[in-house]
Amino acid sequence: MYRFLLSCTALLALLSVTACGRKQAPRITGMARVKLGYEERGIASWYGVPYHGRQTASGEIYDMERLTAAHPRLPFGVTTRVDNLSNGKHVEVRINDRGPFVGGRIIDLSRAAARQIDLLGPGITRVRLKVIAAPASVRAGMGAGTPPSPRFAFLLHPIRSRRERAFLASLSTLAAPDPSPRKSE
């Protein structure tokens, strides 16, 4: 019995050591399945120096002088247009990280992106973001005649119906309500 327990313990120790040796890609759950034209409104902030040179959630190294951003749910590689609602300035950024991790905020911009919309001074501002392009890997597949990855195919079709827009707006508590009048049934 003692030998059996000893061998089971040794086997468990061996399995735990070999499992720790493998580096697996992080699993991101809860990513939004959005289409081109998806819009969201809320508060934006920016992040810079403490994170410069560190690895982002997508695996690339964060460079605060590139036009990138962190979003809690949008797929990595999606390009969004961020409009500063207080001054009308806008910037196009690529999502490459997760965040912000402060309640009430919808996007964290790199320092370069924040500079373009005059966000550096105030630190936070009200913005509207709009998905304007699918990840480059999806767009590249389209030109070659090969079908896009099913994971991102939904990004290639614009939103067509009011029902789709209303559904996507309901995914975010900060999205603007549908201004069109409702028919009474």
Image: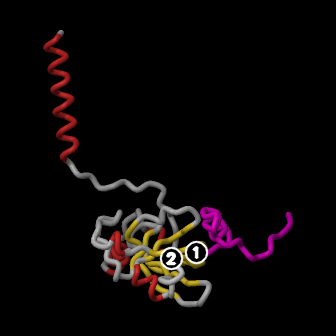
What residue sits 19% from the left and 34% below the top? 15
**32 above or below 130?**
above
Q: Is residue 146 visible?
A: no
Front-lying residue, 179 or 182 = 179
Q: Is residue 91 left or right of residue 42?
A: left
Q: Which residue: 45% across, 65% down?
A: 99
Residue closer to the observer: 20 or 161: 20
Query: Residue at the spot x=50%, y=87% of the render?
Result: 117
Residue type at mark 2?
Val
Of 51 and 134, the residue lying toward us: 51
Instruction: Please tell me whether the stretch drawn in magenta is mainly helix, strand or loop.
Output: loop
Q: Quadrant of the C terminus?
A: bottom right
Task: Give residue 39's mark.
Answer: 1
According to the picture, the residue beneath numbered tag 2 turns out to be 131
Q: Where's residue 102, x and y in %?
A: 52, 63
Please tell me in which quadrant of the rendered image residue 38 appears: bottom right
**Which numbered disc, 2 or 1, marks the residue that appears first in the sequence?**
1
State the separation of the CA atoms marked 2 and 1.
Answer: 7 Å
Q: Which residues, given as a range, are shown in magenta?
A: 156-185
Above or below, 105 against 111 in this view is: above
Amino acid type at image mark 1? Glu
The image shows residue 121, relative to residue 14, as above or below, that is: below
The answer to whether mark 2 and mark 1 are in CB contact below 8 A is: yes
Label 2, secondary structure: give it.
strand
Is-magenta flag for residue 182?
yes
Left or right? Give the position of 135 relative to 7: right
The x, y position of residue 178, in whole percent, is 71, 73
